Every structure is written in C-alpha cells, then in structure tokens.
Image (cartoon, rainbow, N blue to C red):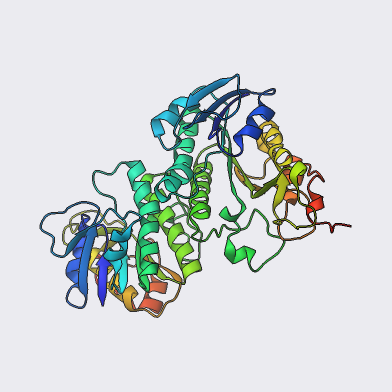
Amino acid sequence: MRILITSAAAPLAQQLATALRPEHEIRLTERTFVPNLPNLAVSPLHHDLSTNLLVREIDALVHVAEPLPTDNEIEQIDYLTRCTYNLYLAAVAEGVKRVVFLSTLDLMTPYAEDYTVGERWRPLPTTATTVLTKHLGEFVSCEFAREHKLDVIVLRLGKVVHAETVANQPFDPLWVDERDVAQAVNRALTTDAKLLSTFHIQSASPNARFSIASAKNVLGYAPVYDFQN
Amino acid sequence: MKVLILGGAGMLGPYVVPLLAPHHELRVTDINPLPFDFAGEFRQVDVANFDQVMAAAEGMDAIINLSVLRQDRQLAFDVSTRGCYNMMRAAVAHGIRRVINTGPHFAVAGPTYERFDFALSPDMPPQPGTNLYALTKALGQEICHVFSEQYDIYVQTYLFYNFHDPATLTPGTDATPFSASWSNAMEIFLPGLAIDLATLPSRCEVFNVFTDMPHGKFSNEKAKRVLGFQPKDDISRLWHKVK
C-alpha cells in the first residue's frame, strides 16, 4: 500500500515511517524541510495543484497532525483546519480512499476517572491549543467522511512513549508505547471499518485510563507493552 | 452598553450599525472602510490579526462578530475560523461575557440535513459538510462553543441565509425557506444585547433567524421563544400566487 505520512518533523511520524516501511511504500511530508529523511516531500498544504500532486497515486494518508516546534497557536489552528481541509480535498480529488487521523485522548480526560469512557462518549475539548486543534481536526475529518464518503479512522492516542525510556518513571495511565501505536495505525490502514470510525488507543495495562476494547474487537489491536515492570 | 462590532463593513453592517447606534456605544471595526456614514468610533481591524482584535476589545461589554469571507480558501479560514478564535481569546482577556456570532444556516444544517429533513432546528449537532463557507463558519462556531464551555462567556450565534428588500420583491416566485427582510432579521441584535444572560438555556445558544414561512423546512421557534424575535409579514408576497 502507498502511504503518505504527514507531520514528518514529529518523532511519531518518523517512528511510524520506520515501523510501516517493511509492509508499505512510505512517503513523508512536512510543511518545511526536515534533514535526513528519505522520501520527504515538502508541501505547505496550500490550495493549489502541488497538494494534489502530493497525494496522487497514494492509497491512504496517515495524518499525524502534529505541529512544527516553531508553530504558534494560530499556526497550529491553521494546520489542523485549513491545511487539513486542503489535504483532504486533494485526497478526495485524487481518489485516496482512506485517512488515518491521529488525535488525542486528552479530548476525553475531563470525564471522571472512574467512568468507563468509550468512543461513544462526547469529546470534551478544552481551549488548550493542542487539544482544541485536535478537536477541530476531528471535526474536519468527520465532515469529509460524511459528505465525501472518505473512510476516516480516528485514533485517539494516549501519551506516546517508548517503554524502555520511561521504565523508571511512575506509571502514567495514559501511556501507550510508540510501537503499539504503529501497530494500531497499521491495523487501521487495512480494517474494514467504513466512513468515520473512532478508536481509543492505550497500552495493555489493566490500569490504563481508557478502554481499548473497541480497538481490539474491530481493528484486532493487540498491544504488547503494558508498563507493568 | 459598549459594543465592539467586528466586520462592520460587510453585508450586515449597514443594517446592524444604524439599528444599534441609538441604543449603544459602538466601536465599529473592519479591515475595509465603512461603506456608509457612521459618526461613532471606527477602527481598521483585521479580525484575523490577534493583536488588533485584542486591542479593539479593550473596554467593551459585548462583541458582535459580523465578519465573513466566503470564497478564498486562505482568507475564509483566516476570517471565519481563526477570527472566532481571536474574538474569544479577546473576550477572555477583557472579561467580556456577551458575544454574538453570526453565520449561514448551513453552518448547522448542511446538505445532509437540508436535503432530507424538515423542521430543522438550530440545536441539531452541526453537519456543515465541506462547503468552504459552511465549514469555516462551523469551525468558528465550534471554537466559540469550546470557549463557552470553559469560560463564563455567553455566545449567541444567529444563523441567517436569504435577505430580501420588501420594495424589490418579485411576487409569486417562492423563496428560500430561510428568508427574511434585511431590516426584520437585523432586529434580532437588539434583544440579543438586552437579554439577561442568566436566562439563556446555556452559555452557547444558536438561533435560526428568518421570518414565519409556510414551508416547514426550518424552525425559527427558538428565536421567538428565547429572544422575543418578531417576524414581519413583509416578504410573504414571494410565496403567494399572483392573482
């Protein structure tokens, strides 16, 4: 499968590229040049032919949707709204069938911790830029799924870490290992789920904040890292 | 009341500003000069410029956002989406609790509603679709909603669509079932500024603003019930057969 991964400057995007490359043909894109990245396509995601060319002959997008380190709050909003709109509109025009949009479980953390919050619960975004922008990105994704029948898989991620790196830190119930995220993305690329489907992606820990039952049942997500040791 | 008007030189400004000027102390802003006479305070403000919006909101009691940009993709997001973000940040910073936002009816009732259903209410979950105008305005509205959830700010959003001048109607031609005369529709801003905020059902309320129409496609019941909006029978010749 030919996959375009956005937000190439983000470590998560690079980790996904490495993890998915054995099974897929991977292209990375970013709004600015990022050194030492193979198959990087620089695209400002403007409303022009260059965005169409970026997604031409791509089978699926993995929209990591992470801002550049230099982005201010206004630029972050712009990326998750206007640039996402341009990217999706080009994708629809070029026949891309599927988008995996990476969102955040921070949209659900305002609920009481003793609630078994699942994907059918209403998101509770805050005005924190990183949360608000992901919410707006989900909003745009939803409308493209609704109107253009684009298959959009939204993965709401916990705090993405590397298990060995946090081994000596107090357990955080939002943790999810980056390799498990890559597994979830890979499953999302090939799932039969249609239109808009949302999944919460956490670790396998019994103390994880949110249930991953839906991701297990529908995607076949089988996380390896549980942070129990 | 000291009222900041954003986008005062647009389609609605020439009706809203003269209506409110006798009752309120207005600070009218726009990126462009006003195309009508106004003796009060005017500032050139780009709603997409955070610093300019922040400065314009200082000392105000309420903000009315009339700004819109429909066609250019960059500007539509700058004005209709990020303009709302700037407005709400300014409202938070200056302790402004009353905000009135505006938009088209399809910021809520996009084609997935309008093609299929009737009696469409402003309280439905928004389905704007991907039309640039509808989606950018809906995103702006969603930003207002999130801010109203987190801060003690009341946002009223007035949805409009078709406006008519009763003097230039073509009788018997029917009308978009979300229509009003310019003057009648703009009257909604007077109760919107006067209403006791504590009487609003929530801190984020959306209203369909159009006259009473027999089509049954949309509902304006909430605007009448909550804000006391009084539709006028001044464009009904549109849907009456010519005898």
Residue at 19%, 70% (x, y): give it.
A19
Direction from residue B212 to residue A166 in the image, left or right: left
Direction from residue A141 to residue A208 in the image, left or right: left
Quarter-of-image position of residue B243: bottom right
Direction from residue A10 to residue A136 in the image, left or right: right
The extreme left residue here reads A36
Residue A198: percent from the left, percent from the top?
Answer: 42, 67
The quarter in which the N terminus of chain A is drawn is bottom left
| Residue A112 vertical placement versus B185 (above, below) | below
Residue at 79%, 53% (x, y): give it.
B171
| Residue B59 vertical placement versus B173 (above, below) | above
Residue at 31%, 60% (x, y): give it.
A49
The quarter in which the C terminus of chain A is drawn is bottom left
Residue A5: percent from the left, percent from the top?
Answer: 26, 64
Residue A138: percent from the left, percent from the top?
Answer: 43, 59
The extreme bottom residue here reads A192
Residue A189: percent from the left, percent from the top?
Answer: 32, 75
Tell which of A45 and B242 is nearer to you. Answer: B242
From where the camera sits, is residue B80 visible? yes
The extreme right residue here reads B243
From where the camera sits, is residue A116 visible? no
Tell which of B74 and B60 is nearer to you. Answer: B74
